[in-house]
Image (cartoon, grey):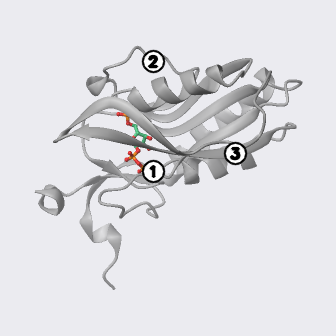
Amino acid sequence: MKTIENDILKVLISEEELTKRVKEIADQIAQDYEDKDPLFVGVLRGSFMFFADLMRYCPIHSGLDFMAVSSYNNGTSSSGVVKINYDIRADLTGRNIILVEDILDSGNTLYNVSRHLMDRGAASVKLCVLLDKPARREKPIHPEYTGFTVPDEFVVGYGLDYADRYRNLPYIGILKPEIYE
Ligand code: PRP
């Protein structure tokens, strides 16, 4: 059968490693937010799988919501400004927010979204990212919770896409170069 696995050069982070690390992060958040009724906010679409696993392993009282954003691009490079396509409807005044992302790359998305949430009256915004790719950082972002630091390679799976594909891969893999060259 022809599957998405045929396009993967190698497994970077296995399902078992993902599960173990996501549970560790969920445990840490549960301890830190036990009495704070946090609002988990997932940035669509890449965060959906990490977000679902994180929440199922974090048994404290909490809420959840999602945002959708896109970057304004100047030709091939990001301008660093993000457009909010879908915002949270609930009142955020005084809420403790945990902003959940699949990958921290340039930092432009989390920088802008976290500022926006603070402007809307949140008491705090803490960042939870599955993957950190520090090689490409443009903004000074330091997440409170990080799953794995990854090299500057084309990673896909567990929510991360190439051309909107491979999000359903159950692990993080590196794409074969011939797929994107
Ligand atoms: C990815 C990822 C983050 C953003 C990180 O989203 O999900 O939102 O890029 O990059 P940055 O740190 O350079 O801002 P993408 O725009 O690919 O959309 P998607 O979530 O729909 O895949």
The residue shown at (78%, 24%) is 93
Q: Is mark 2 within 8 Å of ligand 1?
A: yes
Q: Quadrant of residue 73?
A: top left
Residue 34: image location, x then y, percent: 85, 26
- Spatial CA distance of label 2 from label 1 is 26 Å
- Residue drawn at point x = 78 percent, y = 34 percent: 91
Residue located at (17% from left, 62% from top): 179
Question: In this rendering, would 174 be left or right of 44?
Answer: left
* Label whose residue precedes the other's in the sequence (2 or 1): 1
Work out which quarter of the rendered image holds the N terminus and state it.
Answer: bottom left
Tag in front: 2 or 1:
2
Which quadrant holds the C terminus?
Answer: bottom left
Q: Secondary structure at mark 1?
A: loop
Residue 51: percent from the left, percent from the top? 62, 47
Q: Which residue is mark 3?
A: 65
Badge 2 element: loop
Nearest-to-viewer mark from 3 and 2: 3
